[in-house]
Amino acid sequence: MSSPAKPDLSDVLPRLNDMMREDDHWGDVAAYIPQLATVDPAQFGIAVVTADGQCHVAGDTQVPFSVQSITKVFTLAIALGRSGDQLWHRVGREPSGRAFNSIVQLEQEQGRPRNPFINAGAIVTTDEVLGNREPREALAEIMRFVREAAGTDDIHINDTVAASETDFGHRNFALAHFLKSYGNLINAPERTLGTYFHHCAMEMTVQQLAMAGRFLIEAPDVPRLVAPSRIRRLNALMLTCGHYDGSGDFAYRVGLPGKSGVGGGILAIVPGRASIAVWSPGLNRYGNSQKGTEALALLARHMDWSIF
Ligand SMILES: NC(=O)CC[C@H](N)C(=O)O
């Protein structure tokens, strides 16, 4: 009996792209960052880079989009590289079950954020990366890491988006001041947030993001930026916390470690096999890409890529 043919990504991705455009339930773009509110939600792009370095793409693949919270994976990797397990004194490792920008949880837990992927936790990891340095030095380190991971220097921060968040980021300022009041911020709130808003405002195409995620695959031929044991832990946190209070739903539907951003991007990892970046700016009720999640669920099922 012949075994069924292995699905070919160069067929699968264009079909997935067509399916995503069949209806117009694109979700809503994030309105609380005015620069993101102007993006047309009816866009979709996907890129898959396999462990052997092959890249397959479909859809709107040439558009650089605001990666936002996906940068929290890179800043966490850098913070752990700088401080090791000391970091966990300042931030936890449990799913939050709350919105990404929840204030009430931070107060209840006395200034130690639940995990490094909610905003409060990422403000702490950014503060750890910043240390006593100038924000531009910390940002240069973050950009170096991401560019090296992606294998290209053509990745930049959109200063207009960063300025837009600075002007309207009142919740993040509230979170940072709470952290400071509990003694869990080394720097002045404005200084840490300036760094945070800027790394969130980094832009990438889906291909660049999928390339940047390769270091999380843990395979022989991918760039070795962090130790294998740490890669597994980053993936564990992405699985349990990467989609905020939608993390359980994402694990149920997709079955892969993933990290979303309010710009509509999702980075998902198939351990040992592939790095996937998907982008569609319309969001679901958890603030995660609506079509991006749907596409990942279909792709994971079709390729039999769920880790479970
Ligand atoms: N979920 C996100 O992508 C949030 C990131 C955004 N920069 C914020 O702080 O609100």
Image: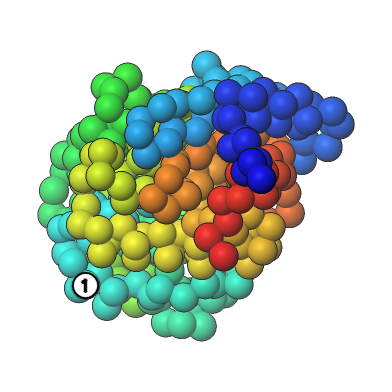
Quick one: 300 or 242, which is closer to the camera? 300
Where, by quadrant of the figure, is residue 137 drawn?
A: top left
Mark 1 Cβ and ligand 1 under 8 Å apart: no
Asked whether residue 252 appears in the rendered view, the answer is yes
Q: What is the total number of numbered labels drawn onto the structure image?
A: 1
Left or right placement of residue 138 versus residue 288 in this view: left
Residue at the spot 63% in from the left edge and 67% down from the top edge: 248
Q: Which type of secondary structure does the marked residue at label 1 adopt?
A: helix
Left or right placement of residue 112 versus residue 249 in this view: left
Residue at the spot 28% in from the left edge and 39% down from the top edge: 222
**Quadrant of the drawing holding the C terminus:** bottom right
Q: Position of residue 70 (x, y in %)?
A: 45, 45
**Quadrant of the drawing holding the N terminus:** top right
Q: Amino acid at mark 1?
A: Asp
Quick one: 142 or 254, which is closer to the camera? 254
Quick one: 175 or 112, which is closer to the camera? 112
Where, by quadrant of the figure, is residue 180 drawn?
A: bottom left
